[in-house]
Amino acid sequence: MAKKANLEYFRAKGLLPFQAEFAAGFVEGEDRPYWQLIAPAGTGKTRTAVALIAHEMEDVSNKRFLIIAPYAVLDDWQLELSLWPSLSTSQAPTPLIVDRKKYLELESHVPVGESPWSSPAIILMSIDLAKRNDIVASISSVTWDLVVFDESHLLTGKRKAIYDTLTKSGAARRALLLTSSSQHLLGDVVRKVNYQDVVDWNWRPLYAPFERKLTPIYYNRTKEEHAFLAELQEFAERLSYGKLILRTASSSIYTTERMLRRLHEAWRFLRNKIAHDVPWTDEDIEKVHRQLSLVVDQPDTFEEMPSSLAIQPEEFLAACDKLESLLDRIDEITTDSKLDALISHVKEFIVAKDKFYLCVWSSFANTVQYLRESMREIAVPVYLLTGALEPIERLNSLKAFRENGGILIATDAASEGTTLEYVDQCISYDLPPNMDAFEQRWGRFLRIGQKPEFRMVVLIDQSRSLRWEGELIENIPFSG
C-alpha cells in the first residue's frame, strides 16, 4: 500500500493527523521493526496502537498480539479493543486479560512443555506479571506479530529484561513502545509529539493554550522541624536506600515516622543476628526492603533497591542507636508547617465556591491517609484514590468525585489510566522523585476538554531543609 493510501486508510478509521501519520509510517517501516511513540498523556496513543492491531488483523487474521501495560489500565485497553469495529466481529479473537490465575488455567489446557499462547490471540498482561522469569520464558517461546509496551518509561531495572528478551530472541516480530516521557528511549525509530501537534484534519488545535508551569506555595519549616530533618538527612545519606527515606521526609512528618518505625522493626531482626554472630542473607535484606516499600504506594519498590545494606556490622549497630534517637526526636515535634500551609491554601481556594474539583497528589499511601484525616476540619467531601483500593472501589470513588465535587486525595500509583480534565487545580503535596513523574501527573489533567484555568500547585519549603528537594526544584519551571 502506497504512503498516501496508508494515510487515507487511517484517516478513514478516525485517527487524527499525527496518529495517522505515525501509523502509516509504522506500516511502511517493516525494515525498522521496533518503534517508540512519545506523546503527552491523553493524546490518543492507545487508539493509534489499536488501529495498527486492527490493520494487521485485516491483512492476515491468524496473528498474535501482546499488550504489556500497568495493571490499572488493562481494562481500558480491553474496552478500546472491543469497541474497534473490525476487532469486535465474531471472527476476531476476544482481547484477553491474563493474570497469574488465568495463565495457570491456559497452561493446564495444553500438554506439558507446549505453549499456552494460541493463534490468533490478543493478550493483555500487566508489566509486573510479564517480568516474572517463568512468564518471560513463556511469552518468548512463540512469535508475536506485534508487542505493545504501554508506559514504556517503566521498562527499567528488571522490567527492561522483558523488552530485551522479546526483541533479541526474535519473539517480537515488531514492537511499539508508548510513553509520555522522552527520558527513556528504546527502539529503531523514535517519534515525539507535542501538544501543539494534536490538531484535527482542518489543522485546528484540540488543546486549549496553557502555561506548562507550576504555581508555588511557599512555607517555612519550624526550628524543631528543620533540626530534625538535618539530623535525618545525615543519617539517611549513609544508607543504600536513604533516598527513599528522604522522600518520605519531604512528604510528611507522619509518613517519616511510619517509615522509621518500619525500619526499626526490620533492623531489630538483623541486630539479633549480629548479637548471635549469624550472617545476614539476601532474604533478610529483601525483608527489610519489603517493609520499607509498604510506605510507598508501589508494591514493587523494593525490587529497584540495592541488594545489600551497604553498611558494615559495626556501623549498623551505631545506625540502630541513631535510629532510636531519631524516633525519640520525632515524637517531640508538635507542629506540621507544611500541612498548615496546605489547609490554609485549600480554605482560600474553596471560599465562595458552590462546587469545585480539587486534587491533592502524593507518592505515599501513609501521607494520603494523614491528609484525609486532616481535611475533616474543612467539612467538604473528600475521596481517596490509592493502590490499596480494588478497581471497583477506585471507579466508585472517581464517579462520586465527578458527580459531587470536593477534594480527591490520590497517589501516583493509583493514577494510571485516570482522566481528570474537569479538575480546577491539582496540589502536588510532595515532590515526585523526578521530572518524569511530574510529567505523569500533568498527563492526568492536560487532556482534550481540560479547563483553561487549571493550575498545578506545588508546596515549596523556603528553608530548604532537605538538599534533595532543592536539587529537584532547580529543574522545575515556576509561573510568575
Image: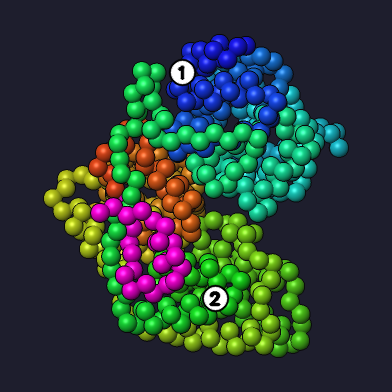
Residue at 40 percent across and 61 percent down: it is 474
Question: Percent from the top left, x then y, of residue 267?
Answer: 61, 78
Helix, strand or loop at label 1? It is loop
Q: Residues within 10 Å of mark 1 (few under 14, many from 20)?
A: some
Q: Is residue 101 above or below residue 239?
A: above
Residue at 44 percent across and 71 percent down: it is 467
Horizontally, is 146 left or right of 152 in the view?
right
Q: Is residue 58 magenta?
A: no
Quadrant housing the C terminus: bottom left
Instruction: Give the image quarter of residue 40.
Output: top left
Question: Percent from the top left, x then y, of residue 75?
Answer: 53, 35
Quadrant housing the N terminus: top right
Residue at 37 percent across and 79 percent down: it is 226
Instruction: Give the image quarter of residue 421.
Output: top left
Horizontally, is 457 left or right of 237 in the view?
left
Q: Is residue 312 above or below residue 308?
A: below
Question: Percent from the top left, x then y, of residue 13?
Answer: 49, 16
Horizontally, is 162 left or right of 331 in the view?
right
Can residue 92 be seen in this snapshot?
no
Task: Give the foreground label among 1 and 2.
Answer: 2
Q: Which residues are magenta?
A: 456-480
Q: Which amino acid, mark 2?
A: Glu
Q: Which residue is mark 2?
A: 237
Q: Nearer the viewer, residue 395 or 51?
A: 51
Q: Is residue 356 above or below residue 297?
A: above
Can residue 345 be seen in this snapshot?
yes
Q: Which residue is mark 1?
A: 14
Q: Which amino acid, mark 1?
A: Gly
Q: Earlier in the sequence, mark 1 or mark 2?
A: 1
